[in-house]
Amino acid sequence: MIVQPKIRGFICTTAHPQGCAQNVQEQIDYVLKQGKIAQGPKKVLVIGASTGYGLASRIAAAFGCGAGTVGVFFEKEAENKRTASAGWYNAVAFEKKAAQAGLYAKSFNGDAFTDEIKQKTVATIKKDLGPIDLVIYSLAAPRRQHPRTGQIAKSVLKPIGKIYVGQSLDVATNTLETVTLPAATPEEIEQTVSVMGGEDWEYWIDALTTQGLLNEGAMTVAYSYVGPEITRSIYREGTIGRAKDHLEMTARRLDERLHKIKGCALVSANKALVTQSSSAIPVIPLYFVLLNKAMKEKGIYEDCIAQIDRLFRTRLYASGPILVDNHGLIRMDDLEIRPDVQAQVQHNWDKLTDSNLAQLADLDGYREDFLRLFGFGLKGVDYNADVDPEQKLPSLSYP
Ligand code: NAI
């Protein structure tokens, strides 16, 4: 089958197996080039391990620290003439590379919010690995069925208290558009907090602690976003921001609990990056294209793997105490929020028009990054060659 990108709105409905494998390989190469991470964890669980920040975390743990990893994600296998999702191919490629490097890697494909996946994962950790050193919580999900009440919650991206009207990028036509987002209802806020807040992170930690599966000194880290003034009313002060507040509050509670085993719970505020989830947030892609232009011009642009590699090396596993801000957050967005970067972004944001968009914004870079998420546009991949879309995940047993 010849696989080409098929873009529908902010999603690409096809993924290229070899391209995704190449994407994983490039991330592995990046980490290997930086050298071994001394003091790194040896047994790592990553929840949301197939794409974006979670995949980068799994790669940094395995190839930077030599860790055995267990990954949990929700991806689609190939079916009939449909390719698998990019995260599926990423996981297949990761497991193959881990096996070649002699590293333990097992994956669970299913809904991380269910008790069933938690139990299966925990049972495997108990059987194969023993107590975990690091748990990364990197879920970005549109919905959650509550494991105790059965209630379904959907995450929405809306402002709170007032309607938002502002400019956004129409990624199909590379033109500016005006978006109007109604204010969220109290139920929508509550549901977004249920999906993207910290409750399920805590359930994962409960599931591990009940079985004695957190090592002495174990760390757990979830990812958050703070962002600048431009995105504030739809991100940090919107429904998703409320969920992040909840996540950060959960970290403080988990931190107290983990102190008993000399461990800690932390939230890392990461940089805004093009991932499958972030492309779906209104207004954010327009901010990305301005931000990326500014960061590339200043030579400080980082992608997912560069962010996470730096998180591991200079924060989580550096010698000395872990650097946090006065809200207790690790600030991996330190370069994004640099005053000179934000001044340039704000300056350009204020004077954007359809005719200067291509000059002020990194439109090509955005498209390249977006296509790469699905395995397209990678060097060394022959996109005219026939590929088998059906790729087995080595750690799953097939009938
Ligand atoms: P992503 O879309 O690339 O990855 C999401 C992961 O969650 C995938 O592995 C997916 O399979 C998994 N997943 C989704 N629903 C699931 C479910 N029900 N059960 C099991 N797995 C499920 O997203 P991204 O951008 O890497 O986001 C990860 C975290 O990082 C999120 O908390 C996000 O808010 C945060 N973050 C993202 C930033 C960005 O600009 N992309 C910036 C700062 C923080």
Image (spheres, helix red, strand yellow):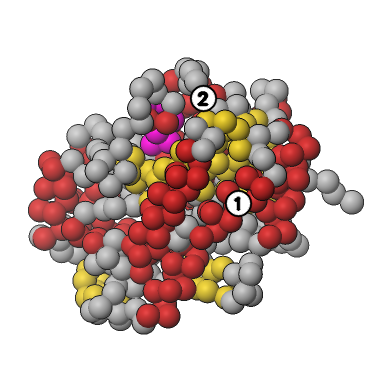
- In percent of width and height, residue 323 lies at 31, 32
**Extreme front residue here?**
260
Q: Nearer the viewer, mark 1 or mark 2?
A: 1
Look at 26% across and 53% down and name the residue there: 227
- Classify residue 79 by image quadrant: bottom right
Q: Is residue 146 above or below residue 335?
A: below
Q: Label 2: few (<14), some or many (≥20) within 10 Å? A: many
User: As drawn, is 3 to the left or to the right of 172?
Assistant: right
Q: Is residue 137 visible?
A: yes
Look at 27% across and 65% down and name the residue there: 237
Q: Is residue 222 above or below residue 147?
A: above
Q: Which element carries disc 1, helix, strand or loop? A: helix
- Residue 173 on the magenta segment: no
- The amino acid beneath tag 1 is Asp
User: As drawn, is 340 to the left or to the right of 324?
Assistant: left
Range of magenta residues: 307-314
Q: Is residue 98 above or below residue 201?
A: above
Residue 206: image tag: 1
Residue 389: image tag: none
- In percent of width and height, residue 121 lies at 70, 47
Q: Label 1: few (<14), some or many (≥20) within 10 Å? A: some
Q: Is residue 384 visible?
A: no
Residue 40: image tag: 2
**Extreme right residue here?**
399
**Assess mark 2: CB under 8 A from ligand 1?**
no
